[in-house]
Amino acid sequence: MKRALPRPATRDLAWKIPALAASAAAAMFAVFAPVPALALTLDEALASAYEYSPRIDAERARLRATDEEVPIAQSGYRPDIGATADYGYRATDIDPGPTTDRKPRGYGVSLTQPIFRGFQVKNAVSQAESIVRAGRETLRAVEQEVLLEAVTAFMDVVRDQAIVRLNENNLRVLSEELKATEDRFAVGEVTRTDVAQSEARRADAVAQLDQARANLQTSRAAFERTVGLPAANLVEPTLKMAMLPGSQDEAVNIGTQENPNVVGALYNEQAARYNVDRIRGALLPQVQVEADYTDRFQEQSGIDSTATASVVGRLTVPIYQQGGIVHAQVRQAKHEHLARLQDIEQARVVVKANTIAAWSQLLGARAQLESAKAAVEANTTALTGVREEERVGQRTLIEVLNAQQELLNSQVNLVVTRRNVIVAGYGLQAALGRLDALSLGVTGIVYDPEAHYHEVDRKWFGISITHEDGRHERLDVDPGVMK
């Protein structure tokens, strides 16, 4: 719903022109006026995004699934225990002789305990632990991406709200300008051309305001999708310089050591190295102990039962098995390890480039901010002067309209630049690997990936799972209805 545009209460033209200039200047300061204390801050929005994001929850679930690789690998240390039982009927007809029937039955228990498997289990456990640590870095990378999206969405709303206010004020000023021009035309001070120019500029202002409002609705939708809250009463933040490094070299040094993509690549290389040793272990001797106990009944005529117990130590020495498949697998794993080494270098190169780019964008945005502030001040002064000169006949109306448009453009540019400074600052944090909830300190409760890891690390049996909030899965409930 559009509000009615204000109109002057008098036709006295002398006071209108300076009043319009004062109105434009006041609007510039109103854009950056303090917001009520009950509004939503950036830190609160980041905390909400961290707690709400389905993408983060999905990655946490994937990491908990990866945690299970460790008990899977540790199962190689544990015994295999099995039991069997059977029951049958057997009839024997001897000619000449009697016919006999028996009901042979029995049960047995077996145990196989690995003693030495060529260090395969040890290396499999180490490989699984490295994969888990790499998964934690993947989770941290996803957290960073979500939080950077939240920062961008927050600042987009702040920017678009300010642009809407600027365009609303611009429309109000141009509407008053049009009314004043019509009044002056009525007394013969200006021509129909001046009126048409004012009408055209006002029509352009209406179109710009409609587009600005559409952009704001789009930004609010993106904000709610990312943060999980409606975008209302957002507080424009200031960049926390204390959280940023002091130089580009320092930033690059931090990024190439702490960025989750680099750290994850290091753990993946470690896992690939353990994988080579694990596969090579199949070429070494294997030692295990086998224990069996069986009890048979009515197996033979005249014998009621037979119990057998045995304990065997078994040594297996591989000489040439399966056509040399293990040798090929070792070579394959070595090549994969070499690829992981190059992945580390690639990750460092990418992080270095991203860090330099983020640093440059931040410096550029801060420099542009100072220029944008100066442009707003200069255009405000220029508009006031042009209006005064037009009042005494030294300027034309189109020059006044042009000055008004230049002021609006500089104000919009200032709003956009303020947004770019904040986004660039947090983008640099992401490049460093420090844009996570723990580093930012935006929430008092941070997800601990080690809690689930230690829960399943030494778990020997059980098929229920623990949810993030501590709930346990009930096997008698359809998983589809669990919240």
Image (cartoon, rainbow, N blue to C red):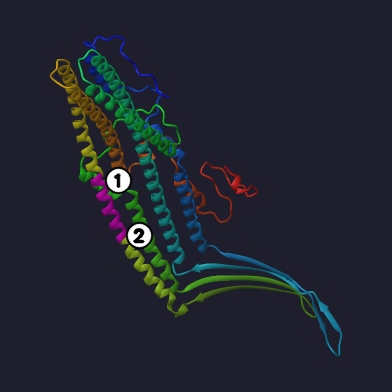
Residue located farthest toward the bottom when viewing the structure as drawn:
96
User: Horizontal placement of 44 versus 371: left or right?
Assistant: right
The kind of residue tagged 1 is Ala
User: Horizontal placement of 316 versus 167: left or right?
Assistant: right
Residue 84 in picture, x, y percent from top left: 68, 68
Q: Identify the residue position indicated by label 1 in the image.
A: 431
- What segment carries the magenta color? 342-357
Asked whether residue 356 is drawn in magenta, I would say yes
Image quadrant assignment for residue 418: top left
Can residue 278 be seen here? yes
Q: Identify the residue position indicated by label 2 in the image.
A: 269
Residue 362 in picture, x, y percent from top left: 24, 39
Find out whether the residues at labels 2 and 1 contact each other: C-beta distance under 8 Å: no
As rendered, which of 222 and 104 lies closer to the eye? 222
Residue 255 in picture, x, y percent from top left: 28, 47
Q: Which badge, 2 or 1, is on the more N-terminal residue? A: 2
Q: Quadrant of the N terminus?
A: top left
Q: Is residue 438 above or below residue 19?
A: below
Of badges 2 and 1, nearer the viewer stands 1
Q: Is residue 177 above or below residue 448?
A: above
